[in-house]
Amino acid sequence: MNISPRWKKLLGDLNATQGRTLMMILAIAVGVFGVGTILNSYAILTREIKQNYVSTNPASALLELDKVDDALVNAVRLRPEIAAAEASSTVTARLEFKPNEWMPLLLFVIKDFKNMRINTFTPEAGAFPPPTGSMLLEREALRLVKTKIGTSLRVQTPNGAKTGLLISGTVHDPGLAPAGQEQTAYGYITPATLEKLGEAKTLHLLKIIVKDQPLEPRAIDSTVAGFAVWLKSQGRVVDEIRISPPAKHPHQTQMTAILTMLLIFSLMALVLSAILTATMIGSMLAQQVRQIGVMKAIGARSIQIASLYLSLIAVMGLIAVSAGVPLGILAGRGFSSVIAELLNFKITSTAIPVWIYVLQVCLGILVPLAIAIFPILSATRVTVREGINDFGSSRKMISLPWFDRLLEALRFDRTLILSIRNTFRRRGRLILTLGLLAAAGGMFMTSLNVKAAWEQALTE
């Protein structure tokens, strides 16, 4: 196989610097792995949390009325601006999960469990619908109170006495914030059970879905406002109107914010690895100035020599990508599963969009190239005379009398003065090294600041 001299030289350089080359590949691979993990998780989680929430057919608005009966629900369903309507109620109670230890309990009163159309949930275990005198618990609430199906817990509503309710089963409700995070148990009962708890079984909550533009907040606000006027004209008392952001899980914004923060840190890690690569390339080029001069003496052009080293960076990036991307996929899917369990929704698909793969490949190759191109172009612009006469100091060293006078005035040890002067001879390499240290220190301080701010916010 005929290989051109420049590629033979490149292969020889790789063989002579195997440890350094492996370190550069590893640095880029770690950066690609970090970015890939968060990007993959972001793509999976944002899609799945929305699908889980939308699958419950969430209400466009919840209206608290003096009374919601069958006649009103039937009349609302005939309204041209309303796509669906149901009656329900919510009652804030408390539950005794340990002797003399209580926690908040939010009871959802469902008139017809088998024909729910709005804010639906799916049964998981036990009896469904719950018999009178019992309740269903959301599956995360069952873990929160550390009990099991078939046990009886005491419940107290605002107007009732402490009454024992049997836990008849569990459901999965992805439309709610996780019980553990809210420190609130979620229960589902019938109107007859509510009456046994000492409350009137009259329903007070009207859930509606608007027909036109059900995902547009302004359209929902306008429709609900007109609908509330109609209700008042029918003699109904509207105590409260609650409109949640359409098609958005209660904790979706927090999840997106945390993922965005992690993505920024992973991008910083990738840039850090690229700076490390550029620093090592710059160090290697500093040792090959005479070789570059010789190559130019026999006819090589600056662009040819630069392309040689840029190709080296591209090949290392490609190798790093081939290792970092698959590992990022595995880690991203695993991280997504952990977050989904934490936020109480199911992942139905771990498919990752194609553009995510393309972006990772581009980042793994182009970011190191973009940062390394400056020291490479600077080194390859050396003339034949400068290259062959290179003796280790900067070819374009500019005398700085004020700097020399400052060193003399400080009366440092001669050895220290020599080391300081040598440090400033290769200013390009010095800038890369300082950039590397500054980026690493900045990442470290940023992470500490975020951690401290987060803990302080939680404490407050």
Image (spheres, rainbow, N blue to C red):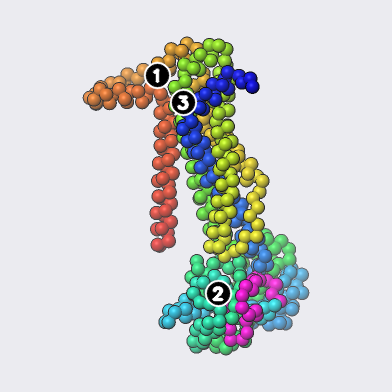
Please state the extent of the stretch shown in magenta in the rendering.
115-137
- Most extreme residue toward the front is 1
Placement of the N terminus among the 4 image quadrants: top right
SS category of the residue bearing label 2: strand
Q: Is residue 132 magenta?
A: yes
The picture places residue 103, in percent across and down from the top left corner, at 47, 76
The span from disc 1 to disc 3 (Cα, nearest Å) is 13 Å
Q: Residue at x 73, y 63 (%)?
A: 212
Q: Nearer the viewer, residue 248 or 245?
A: 248
The span from disc 1 to disc 2 (Cα, nearest Å) is 73 Å
The picture places residue 426, in percent across and down from the top left corner, at 40, 23
Q: Amino acid at mark 1?
A: Gly
Q: In the rendered image of this protein, does residue 121 appear above or below residue 270?
A: below
**Residue at numbered disc 2:** 186
Q: Amino acid at mark 2?
A: Tyr
Q: Residues within 10 Å of mark 2 (few under 14, many from 20)?
A: many
**Residue at numbered disc 3:** 284
Q: Amino acid at mark 3?
A: Met
Q: Earlier in the sequence, mark 2 or mark 3?
A: 2
Mark sitting on residue 392 = 1
